[in-house]
Image (cartoon, rainbow, N blue to C red):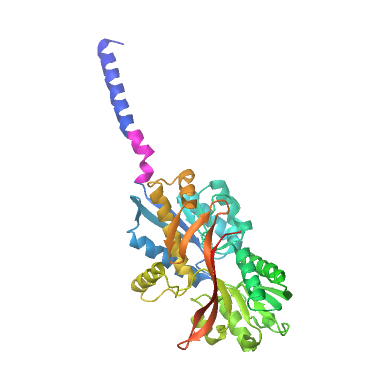
Amino acid sequence: MDRSSQRRSLGLGFVAMMIMAFVVPLAAHGQGTAPFKIGVLASLTGSVADVNAGQINGLKLRLKQVGYQIAGRKVELVIEDDAGDPNTGLSKAQKLIERDRVDLVIGPFLGHVMAATQDYFGRKGVPVLPLVGQTPENVKPANILVPSWNSAQLGRMMGEFAAAKLGYKNAVIVSSKYSFGTRVSEGFRSGFAAGGGTVRKEVYVPLGTVDWAPFVGGLPEGTAIFSAVPGADAIKLVKTRHEFGQRDSMPLLAPISTVDGMLLPAMGEAAVGTVAVTHYFEDLDIPENTRFVEDYRREYGKPPAGYYEALGYTIVQIVEAALKATGGRSDPATLLPAMKSVDIRTPQGRLRFDPAKRYPYLDYYFVKVVAKGGKPAYQILDVARNVRPD
């Protein structure tokens, strides 16, 4: 090689080095300017469609408040409908992660869809926040962080309360036949038995059942009824048992999902007297919830109808706090520990996770549905503060 060629080669090498010196830092920090993509896997058709739609309203409200920007990154939502079907849920999860290349997944909602997708999520390692409480069996992978209750624990707390505080000695279970319905009912049975109560009969009803009369009729007299039933099915259950004259003779006990505020207007007086356990209701008198209710009403022209809108809002708060803590970095090895470390004030009160359990500490309220101004509303019976997750 002649001297001129050598000089050219050295010059080109120097230019290449300068380019690399500039480009490599950009690549290392490129995720700070690339959009942060959130995949939402929800049941937007089927018996819980209205519930999930309200929850997405809560998600969008918080994102709008922060201008769809967190830690210097534009936030993009990719929403998919799993239709409440496990196979559809798995294929939509694969689309979100492999084709859309989302940084984080919010969802699914229904327990049997969560059960069908959890192994896939675990293999991919993308952080996942289910849309509602789940059973421990459905969230085994370490990258799934539940922003709500442990379903089995929720049922057990209701069983203990029914026996110890309400004084019930006999109960029957009429719940939906899917993982949440059966598992939360197992929890109720355990807690009720520990308090000296007896479950005399258990009935599990397929999701989407139109006629609830065969399942509600013929239940043992002199018992309370525990029911874990979601969405439109809960409306059918509550109305049918009222038609059978059970509202006053066989008190209804439930997780809040059975008598969520979104469902109460359709249930009307049939829901009065129900006792439920929850960690949120729309009249919760704390500053964070007062602001949330006002903001939601301003945005959508109506108040939030129940627990799910507030949980959607809270989930974004979790993501927001974690992404700010990482300075915008969203690789799972950085983002997931930050999510586990959040300690924030939400419409539901203070939220912080037990990092080993991957569920949050929560305040739980035992509420009774009462008639207030001609409409069903909640009355607080008791509160359990800062409950550690199982």
Magenta span dominant secondary structure: helix
Answer above or below: position of 28 versus 67.
Answer: above
Could you tell me if residue 161 is visible in this image? yes
Q: Is residue 230 left or right of residue 18?
A: right
Q: Nearer the viewer, residue 228 or 56?
A: 228
x and y percentages locating residue 315 in the rendered image: 45, 60
Q: Nearer the viewer, residue 343 or 134?
A: 343
Answer above or below: position of 138 versus 13.
Answer: below
Label tally: 0
- Looking at the rendered image, the quarter that the C terminus falls into is bottom right
Range covered by the magenta-colored residues = 23-32
- The stretch drawn in magenta includes residue 141: no
Question: For the view shown, which residue lies furthest in the top direction?
Answer: 2
Question: Image quadrant of residue 187?
Answer: bottom right
Q: Is residue 112 left or right of residue 353?
A: right
x and y percentages locating residue 107 in the rendered image: 51, 59
Residue plotted at (36% across, 72% down): 294
Q: Nearer the viewer, residue 286 or 310?
A: 286
